[in-house]
Image (cartoon, rainbow, N blue to C red):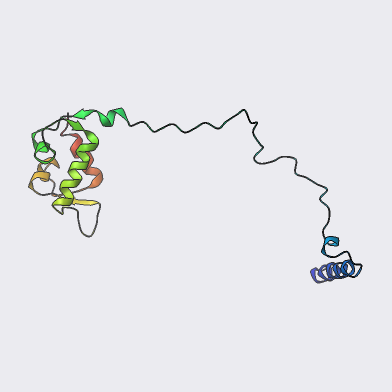
Amino acid sequence: MSIECANLRAGLAASRSLEKGRGIAGLLRPVTHFPKFVSNPPQPNNIMPKAKSARKPNAALMKPVQPDDTLAKIVGSKPIPRSEVTKKIWDYIKKNKLQDAKKKTLINADDALKAVFGGKKQVTMFEMTKHISGHVN
């Protein structure tokens, strides 16, 4: 049977149903089949979902580190956490406009940063963290 023929038969059945006064309800079939499983079954009332605990900071990142003399010119000589060292370096970079204008992942070193970066005049952000880790104890 072609699609046009099937559509025609369905249309005739619908019009007959409407002629007999059944209305649209006559077009609807009763549901006789239910799925065997439910994707999200209801949980019993006595089981509550676990509440998310607050995220704990990484202890290794919060441990104060001592910057050497070269890095101390930029971040200060007091022991501070590694995360603060990175923040202070970025503040220094932004204050002195040392981020490359065309490629933002590159840092152009001035005299103070060139000593930290091992004499390189330009490094990527990812190399920067590697160079900084050599200047903290």
The answer to whether residue 44 is above or below residue 94 is above
Residue 11 spot, x, y in % from top left: 83, 70
Name the residue located 39 percent from the left edge and 33 percent from the top edge. Answer: 55
Q: Residue at x 24, y 57 (%)?
A: 103
Q: How many marks?
A: 0
Looking at the picture, how far across and down is residue 21, in whole percent? 90, 67
Q: Specify the quadrant of the image occupied by residue 57.
A: top left
Please give left or right for residue 105 compared with residue 44 in the image: left
Q: Quadrant of the N terminus?
A: bottom right
Where, quadrant-wise, is the C terminus in this rendering? top left
Q: Residue at x 72, y 39 (%)?
A: 37
Q: Residue at x 14, y 39 (%)?
A: 75
- Is 7 displayed left or right of 21 in the figure? left
Residue 73 in picture, x, y percent from top left: 8, 39
Vertical arrangement, residue 111 with respect to residue 50, above or below: below
Q: Residue 70: image x %, image y %?
A: 9, 37
